[in-house]
Image: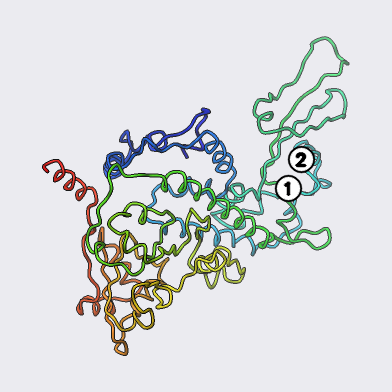
Amino acid sequence: MVVESCEENKELGFDDLFQKYISGECSDRDKEFFSKTKELYKTYNLKLSIDIVKGLQIKLKDNGWFQHFKHHLNDVDTWIDFENEIEKVLILLGTLFNIEFEKNSIINFDEDNSSRLDIAKNIIDNDTVLLNKILLDRTGLKSNIINSLLKEFKIFNTMYGVRSQEKYSTQNYFKKVTKDEFDIFQEVTKNVKGLIGLNLYSHKKEAFSEVLNKKYLKRFEDKFLSFNETEIFRQLLIELDEFKHIFENYISSIINNIEPTKSFDTFGDLAKEIDAVYTFNYSNIFERLYPNSLESQLNQVEVQYIHGSAEHKNIVLGISDLDEGKLKKYKIYGFVKTFQKLVSNTDYIFLDNSDVKLTSKPPINYLLQNDYEIIIWGHSLDSSDGEYIREMFNLNSESLLNRVTIRIWYHGSQQLANLMHIMGKDVIQEWMKKGWLVFEAAPDIYQLNQQKQSLLEIA
């Protein structure tokens, strides 16, 4: 939003982008986070060039998902908030497709000669029609929300027109104008007293906000029947792909460029040998920030991006599945993460023996015959990634020789609640009793680095 609203022709640095948090116009938690960030990282090196800012501004102002998210997701706790909002939008728009048009659903200019519609008749293009506002009221109390959505995703467009009418004549002159011209145009009537008979003009401006392209409507011959769900969902999917590219740009320009002021040490069990790394992030933070102490281990494995990476421009962002009763019938699988992973070639066989690249050990049946540990760090363990969570809990079996321990570095109790929701309390209770599931407080990176610095100063 800072990039979008920037009016100056200048590059934006870290302090420009996050001024709200740095200055303390936020919660104490956020203020502390950004304060520590500035201390641990070379934030002064981060810059968005003028060209990047301009390019992002154009894309942001034109993207329906960004415009929607910025109004409806002011408080985001986890990434699933975005996914839930995408699903809400799809389901909400689905209510449109049950509406059958009646005779007056589309404004018929031949049946109404009011001055307002006279203007509309003359400025609306051949490919567009004017929808009757009454139609959306059939969706109930959410008609205003649906109207806003259709405008955000450019399914509804606004057209502006001006009429100039000769005062003593029926002659009208119509002109289509831009938004800027419309805003500054003054509705006036020119009066020249005592000069009856002169050509005097009155001016009137009108805006029509329910103008839509005919491709978004189903029709039979010249009769419009209903909304066209295929074209409307296609537009939303195009905008989602564009939003993903915007986000990839942001991650590549900011997150992937952040450098620590001093190298980080590993902590916890990360100092042990690593056989495989899976990340749900889009950034390359893990392998960049811990290269020295993990070099020998990371050289043996390829960090696998479960949901794609900004660097490879194939990030996955969508919903877990199509709602059986409300969305599945539309076959809009482009919004589903599993479909996106297949298309983007990020659909790795999670924790499969052939998928873990072990160069120093015989790969055949290694995972099936040896005990090993899975460390989970920074994942909410929410239902949006339930398929991976269920796979991990299927690894222990009486028929297998190995035993798997899942160690969760937690930040709060919500992760345990999420696991119980997905797997059921009996499974979680059994795993914890047998020592297969362990919760451990997440390491405080800031504190560890402060301690390290103190020791160096003493030495």
Kindly identify the residue that appears in the image at 28 percent across and 81 percent down.
Answer: 370
Q: Residue 137's spot in the image, x, y percent?
A: 61, 53
Asked whether disc 1 touches disc 2, contact meaning CB atoms under 8 Å apart, the reply is yes
Amino acid beneath label 2: Ala
Residue extending farthest to the top is: 194
> Circle 2 is placed at which residue position?
120
Question: Earlier along the polypeptide chain: callout 1 or callout 2?
Answer: 2
SS of the residue under disc 1: strand
What is the quadrant of the C terminus in the image? top left
The CA distance from mark 1 to mark 2 is 8 Å
Residue 130, label in figure: 1
Residue type, numbered disc 1: Leu
From the viewer's perspective, is 342 left or right of 33? Answer: right
Residue placed at 36% from the left, 56% from the top? 287
Which residue occupies the foreground of this view, 321 or 455?
455
Q: Residue at x 49, y 63 (%)?
A: 319
